Image (spheres, rainbow, N blue to C red):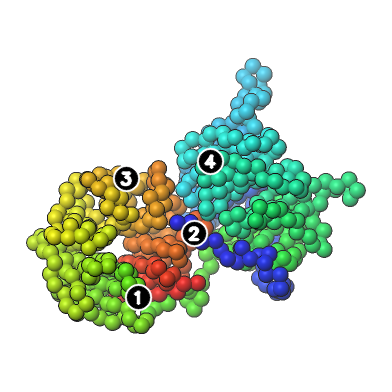
Amino acid sequence: MNAPTNPSRRNFFRQMASRFDPNAPAVAPWSLVPEVNAGDGDVLWSGWTGQGQVFVVGDEGRVLHFDSHPETQRLGWQLMDVPIRQPLHGIWGRSPNDLHAVGWMGCILHFDGKQWQSVQGGVVDNDQGRFTACTENTPLFAIDGNAAGEAWAVGDNGCVLHFDGTHWQPETSGITTNLRAVTCTPGGHVYAAGNDGSVIRRDEHGQWQVLDCPHSSGLHALLVLGEDELLLAGGRYFVDQGGFRGELLRYADGCFTPLTFDTPLPRLRALRAYKDGVLIVGDQGRLFYLKDNQLKQLECNTHHDLMDIIPLASGEALVVGDFGTVMTAAPEFVHALAPAATDETTSHWQIMPSATERQLWGITQTHDGTCYACGDAGTVLRLHHDVWEPLPAPSELPVHCLWSCPGSGLFAAGQEGRIFRFDGQHWQLHFDLHLDLTILALWGTAPDSIYAVGDEGLILHFDGLRWQRMPSGTTSALYSLWGLDDAHLLAVGDFGLVMRYNGDNWKDFNAGTEQFIYGIWGAALDDIHAVGLSGTLTHFDGQRWHAVPARVQDDLLAISGSTSGVFAVGTRGCALHLEHGSWQRETTPTSEGLRAVCATAEGTVYAVGDRGVILRRRAP
């Protein structure tokens, strides 16, 4: 399931009647970041930030690194050892331990958290001691990637390179003009742009298409506003005006439209979403803030050309450019690297009155739209008219999971391998394993096809007449169960274990991690997410599992999705929301552990956990 497009981005240029607020925080003055270890002759071209760290790349193979963690913060900005001396123009990655940088002479570098290594490019003729005129040495100017770990780099002569997670391979772009920008959309498209108004789009099948852009501007930047909506920036030289003039274009509904303003623009270099609008930088130290089709020039104490914008987790940003320039509007640079503390009153999540103080282990929405939660001491709660009310207890034992479909009644399972069925009035014992094994998850397709998994590799199947144990081939606990139909089921367990059922037998494969996996959910067979110990996040794209950068250290215990989005919850009140292909932490009004989450068909999301806590996140 693709993350929903942010409506505010889609409406940047539709809210023409809105007034620009000159007192908005986005117009704060920009100042130089102190003690940056860059010389006056250095051009800094681009940067990346994540998990409290910043990497900035520039001329002469320079890579500057700042780590805000307490044990390393005192070291300040550090110049990293890099195996080349060619200019580096772009950097992208999924974590500080998995970064890619591209630059002059086709150079591609990779950082594994310990050292930078040369991957390709920079081929030298040993006889002449000069760079060889070969395709591999085509200069690269930009790189971007997606949450699955794929990346694209673009450069001169229409060069496009694709990284599939392991290898770089050239792709046919269909053009020969120089490309200077590339960006990925949440829906799987990739756009690239460059000289003479060149714009190309890669579809989900890997084919590049040349878009008909009637404007001949040299394009340097792209910003995704929607799946097929872009903002493009650049400029071209005008003889009669004696210099470059910046241009902004909007692409929507298959058409390119220039945006015009009274303010004259220099050549524009970069665009980023910023504080409900767009931050724009360009030559001569010019910064602009665009919102609701109103353009405001920001106060900036430099005249050096500005090359790129690096968004920070706190909502602030860094701007880098010529003469070693690194700037921010944040009052304190180090604090801006971490997400700003959010007042609980602004949280999307609210605590609901609970009918128990028992630990809650599970929550589900049944076929008729009713939500149920379950927990210790036989606790089963039903949400009725926005109030959680207790049902009779099936037994005194903990209930870990619930499931229902039309005609089946409500099933509850948990400790000692017991499964109960509720007919609307009374609970009846439906199955007893007669073993001290806990059933941890239920799932089914019909009243005569229900599955259960649990401790020590336990897998059970109900065929409408009786429950039978299925051979699993594992002794690992199986914590969660997800399926598309009776021939496509997945169960997850210890050390990255994923058990896959094909309708005949269960086989195991690994989710690309050695951590315990506690929850799994998918929108389709090529879009499956799993979560687990120590912030583990991994995604299956139909071919392979890809580790996703963790923004939290909390254990993630459950995951659920619907048309409202995909959500994961865990210890210490942790809640994550998948937005535009990346996981974002959301503030919750509790520090209790959250054990289960349910994204309902209506868009409301519920999470339950320790001490009977129940949270609700209303649909936007």
**Of the residues shown, which amino acid type is indicated by label 3?**
Asn
Q: Which mark is residue 614?
A: 1
Which mark lies nearer to you, 1 or 2?
2
**Of the residues shown, which amino acid type is indicated by label 2?**
Ala
Picture coordinates of residue 444, whole percent (x, y) = 26, 60
Residue, far top: 127
Label 4: few (<14), some or many (≥20) within 10 Å? some
Q: Earlier in the sequence, mark 1 or mark 2?
A: 2
The residue positioned 82% from the left and 49% from the top of the image is 244
Q: CA distance from mark 1 to mark 4?
A: 44 Å
Q: CA distance from mark 2 to mark 4?
A: 21 Å
Q: Give the structural element (helix, strand or loop) at label 4.
A: loop
Q: CA distance from mark 1 to mark 3?
A: 33 Å
The residue positioned 53% from the left and 41% from the top of the image is 206
Q: CA distance from mark 1 to mark 2?
A: 25 Å
Q: Earlier in the sequence, mark 1 or mark 4?
A: 4
